[in-house]
Amino acid sequence: MLTKSYRPELVAKPPLSLSIDLSLCEHGDQDPLAHCDPVWREKTIELAGRGITVRSLLDFYDLLGTSVFLHYDPAKSLTNDVVRQAILPLSRRKLRSPEEAKTQEAAADCHRPVEEKEQSAEKDSRESAKEAKLNSNMQEDAPALVRGKTGLIPRSMSHMMHRVSSRPCPDELEDFVDDYALHAKSDDMEGVAYAVITSGGIPRYPGKMVTHNWGNLFVHLLAAVCADALGLPTFEAAAAMLEARQTEELRRRLEKAGKLDYCYWVCAFCVNQHCSICHVNFAPTDSHGVPIVSCTCKVPKHASGSLSEMNKFDDMMAYLKLVNWRRARLTGSGDVFGQVVAVDSRFLVLTRVWCVAELLEAYKLVLPQDLKIHSESSRASAIQNLKSLDVRQAQASYPADKDFVLAKVEDFDSFNNQVRGLVVANLDTFLRTSMLDAFLDDFTSIMFESIVG
């Protein structure tokens, strides 16, 4: 009562540093996308429904080096390599007729959460629908996947399953590149987000969004997701299991924790790369020196505007916050939408402009945030990179992306200090050292002024 009397502004809008969220109490079911034009709003909702389960991510990992991306090496292959050499070819499918597209879209609309139609049996019904759709999709006009001994594989590559060992010989690698090159030049193919393939086209709304750097090792991205699902502060152990191909043991632990079918939102899988970057290669080869084959699918490309899938993360995060709040209210689970930051060993995630933007947007939305680092030994690098953090020096694949993000920043020094303080607050929970104490001392006064003032 005293606070309300003397500092009413703190009750109306508590400082973000206190992590007190009153927005849903005040606005309830208010649509966070009400300000958007209809096309932008529809695309944002579509993106929000592309969650992918941990089970599907592990199934995908089992394909690497066995039926797709035959030269995959967990110690060397980057997320960018995996997108180019595995996600893009696996997410191609035959063009649908207008009637087929309308039927699938109508089926998907029935599962939208905005009408509060989620029931306690939602998970079982969606899994049943997924299996039914996969069974019916064994026609040429369906997503080009069939079941192999390691899970779902692309139909165009299924003939390779009988001869691909755990490591391909040079001839097999050359055959794969030739097969993909032929597949990529097909005129009757379209592309979708990989998450659409795994869900059978039915919306899945994730409980967490994963912020990550495509220049990071892919195995570390997946390990960070597994570590978060298992409640581990670092992902070193999960990475070691993935590198040793102990995916069955990981599945067992995740299932025991009740997290095997938990949904995350990971841009590499959940954005339709075919409507954004599939036709452009920033390098002629991947990190192994193997040529990258450009995709020639017929999906229209949208780098900006209402149909783009690369400029809606802030609106999507706000929408998923509401979706998860509604789901928690219906089920009584108490779960809220959160963010996981998969931090590479050199902490370069903070040098990517989109990663920094997502980090601060989650902070503004008062979302629970959890940084997953490789190990305790990587903390020194983390602190050193924080000291030199400047969003103006952050990198982006497209200059327009950087311009888009920086245009939203009013005060760069304040922005940098907010991000530093945010990361320090997360690291402080398990990485308190003398170095971190000194860093905190340097920025405490500036942080207090920029966040509270």
Image (tube, rainbow, N blue to C red):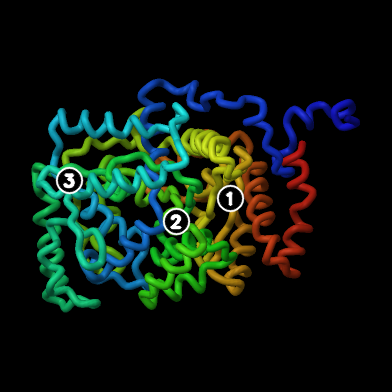
Residue at left offset 75%, top offset 27%: 12
Residue 391 relative to residue 80: left or right: right
**Dot placed on the residue nearer the N-terminal end, 2 or 3:** 3
Where residue 85 appears, x then y in whole percent?
Answer: 25, 60
| Label 1: element kind | loop
**Distance from the alpha carbon under mark 2 to that under mark 3:** 36 Å
Q: Which residue matches tag 2?
A: 213
Asked if one can make out residue 233 in the rendered structure from this viewpoint, the answer is: yes
Q: Residues within 10 Å of mark 1 (few under 14, many from 20)?
A: many
Asked if one can make out residue 314 in the rendered structure from this viewpoint, the answer is: no
Q: Residues within 10 Å of mark 2 (few under 14, many from 20)?
A: many
Q: Which residue matches tag 1?
A: 390
Is there a contact, CB below 8 Å, between mark 1 and mark 2? Answer: no
Question: Camera-side residue: 60 or 36?
Answer: 60
**Dot placed on the residue nearer the N-terminal end, 1 or 3:** 3
Q: Amino acid at mark 1?
A: Asp
| Label 2: element kind | loop
Residue 103 in which image quadrant:
top left
**Distance from the alpha carbon under mark 1 to that under mark 3:** 51 Å
Where residue 168 appears, x then y in whole percent?
Answer: 19, 76
Q: Which residue matches tag 3?
A: 136
Where residue 429 appears, x then y in whole percent?
Answer: 69, 61
Q: Is residue 106 above or below residue 268?
A: above
The residue most toward the front is 121
Q: Amino acid at mark 2?
A: Asn
Q: Amino acid at mark 3?
A: Ser
Question: Camera-side residue: 294 or 297?
Answer: 297
